[in-house]
Amino acid sequence: MSVVLAVDVGGTGLKGAVVDVHGRALVRRDRPTALDGRGPADNLLALLADLSSAAGPDVPVAVGVGTPGIVDEATGTVVYASNLGWRDFGLRALLEESTGLPVGVGHDARAAGRAEQLASGTHGSFVFVPIGTGIAAALVVEGRAVSGVAGAAGEFGHVVVHPDGEACPCGQRGCVEAYAAGAAVLRRYRARGGEAASTAEVVARVGADPLADAVWADAVRALALGLQGLTMLLDPAEIVLGGGVSGAGPVLLDPLEVELRSLLAWRAPPPLRTARWGSEAGRIGAALLGFERAGIAPDFVL
């Protein structure tokens, strides 16, 4: 059976899987992006070696990697990824030399958005926004993801919503990501004196902890301000939220819908929902990149 080694690269973690042509993750392996002093590229290579060993009798035909940042998908080069410290990094060349397999490299959000298209069976227009350590977006217009002239379309997390606001890792100030990303929620909670080990802990305290309420309200507001702009520009049929933070469910969706409705004075907001693939969207999107690189048309089903 044809399988690919798929990795969704995040600022905090690498989510890997051995995926078959039906979209089934036969093996899952996760690894921190930075571990034991090793950088993201070294840890990615180690994860791929682990996945290859775990594939068993199924011989991988390709590798698929979804990465944040500005990605030249034609050459497999990561032009810039602030959370990874990559600039003009030939990721495809490195991985093909190391694995001996064809490698598909693409923008993580656009790849996950394609997975969502398959799950939804839609050929229309929607926005897919994964919210994890960072934030990006897949902008799908009439069934096609917009990549932009330099592969930089969809950097939704770096839309400035609070001019002269808090510093963002990208070098700007007041970005959506600086308030609404999972890493930002945890950082801002701790900076105000709160103690929590994870973003999930902060979210779990919403409604019972005034500090968590304040930080979460800031995150929802920043996200709504960014989504207002996307709504007015693209008029999407729906907005789909993915990534780890979307696991908050109604704690995120309910106040976000209220905020977005208040910002759209003369029109209703598009429907909001969480991704059908859930936290697997990134892995499935990466697998699509791999099968595409191998010239194989997968038959993915939920």
Image (cartoon, helix red, strand yellow):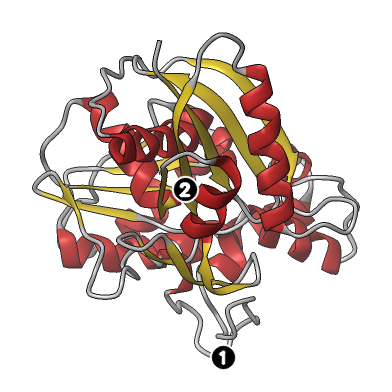
Q: Nearer the viewer, residue 302 or 57?
A: 57
Number of numbered discs overlaid on the protein picture: 2
Residue type marked 1: Asp
Tell me if residue 68 can be seen: yes
Q: Position of residue 160 (x, y in %)?
A: 45, 79
Name the element at disc 2: strand
Q: Is there a contact, CB below 8 Å, between mark 2 and mark 1?
A: no
Which residue is at a point 68% across and 62% down the rendered structure image?
184
Kindly identify which numbered label has been placed on residue 164. Answer: 1
Q: Position of residue 34 (x, y in %)?
A: 78, 54
Which residue is at a point 66% across and 18% down the rendered structure image?
54
- Alpha-carbon neighbours of circle 2 within 10 Å: few (<14), some, or many (≥20)? many
Quarter assignment of residue 31: top right
Q: Position of residue 232 (x, y in %)?
A: 19, 66
Q: For mark 2, what is the residue?
A: 66
Q: Nearer the viewer, residue 114 or 124?
A: 114
Name the element at disc 1: loop
Task: Name the N-terminal-most of marks 2 and 1.
Answer: 2
For the view shown, which residue lies furthest in the bottom direction? 164
Left or right, 294 with respect to 243, comes to left
Distance in Å between CA atoms under marks 2 and 1: 31 Å
Left or right, 220 with respect to 20, comes to right
In this picture, is 227 found above or below 195? Answer: below
In this picture, is 195 found above or below 249? Answer: below
Which residue is at a point 84% across and 68% down the rendered structure image?
191
Which residue is at a point 68% across and 22% down the rendered structure image?
53
Quarter assignment of residue 185: bottom right
- Alpha-carbon neighbours of circle 1 within 10 Å: few (<14), some, or many (≥20)? few
Residue type marked 2: Gly
Q: Nearer the viewer, residue 159 or 252?
A: 159
Left or right, 79 with respect to 174, comes to left
